[in-house]
Amino acid sequence: MVKLIKMQVIYMNLEILKHLRHERKLTQSQLGAQLGVSTSTIGMYEQGRREPDNRMVLRMSKVFGVTADYLLQEESIKDGHDITLLTACWEKELRQSRLLILDGKPLTDEQREVILSAIQEGINRAKSM
C-alpha cells in the first residue's frame, strides 16, 4: 500500500530578497559570489523565474543574518506587515521616478536625498527604541 502525503510548498518572499540585497548595498553579482551562484541565478530568484532550494535559503539566511523563516514569510509589501519593506518600496520609487513634485515643482536630486535620508533615519531610530 502506498500512502500519499500532501505537502505544502513554501516559496521564498521575493520582495524580502530584493530588500535585503539593496539594504546591504549588494549587486546581484556580489550576492551571487557570496552564495556561490551566478548573477543570472540571483536575477531569476528576484524575478520569480527560479526558486532557491532549502540549502540556498539557509545560505541566504546566513549571508543576510536573518532566519530562514524570515526569508520564507508570506507577508508582502501589499499586506502592510513589515514597515522596512514598505519603506524600501518608497525608496525605490524616490530613486527611480523623475516625475515627482514637491510644492508644485519637480523634486531636485538634493531634495530626493534629504527625503531618503529622513526615511532611513526614522527607521533606524524606531529600531533602536
Image (cartoon, rainbow, N blue to C red):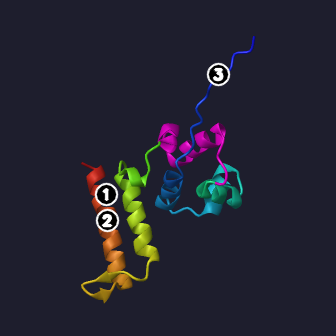
Q: Is residue 67 magenta?
A: yes
Using the image, determine if residue 120 lies above or below residue 63.
Answer: below
Q: Quadrant of residue 85?
A: bottom left
Q: Tell me if label 1 and label 3 are in contact, CB under 8 Å.
A: no
Q: Residue at x 54, y 43 (%)?
A: 61
Front residue (pair 9, 61): 9
Front residue (pair 24, 82): 82
Q: Amino acid at mark 3?
A: Ile
Q: Amino acid at mark 2?
A: Ile
Residue neighbourhood size for the residue with mark 1, other residues' Cα within 10 Å, grouped as few (<14), some (14–19), many (≥20): some
Q: In the image, which disc is placed on residue 119?
A: 2
Front residue (pair 12, 21): 12
Which label's residue is closer to the chain start, 1 or 3? 3
What is the span of residues highlighted in magenta in the rendered image? 49-73
Say left or right for 86 vs 60.
left
- Assign the magenta stretch its main secondary structure: helix
Residue under label 1, please give it: 123
Quadrant housing the N terminus: top right
Residue neighbourhood size for the residue with mark 3, other residues' Cα within 10 Å, grouped as few (<14), some (14–19), many (≥20): few
Label 2 sits on a secondary structure element that is helix
Residue 127's spot in the image, x, y percent? 30, 50
Q: In the image, which disc is placed on residue 5?
A: 3
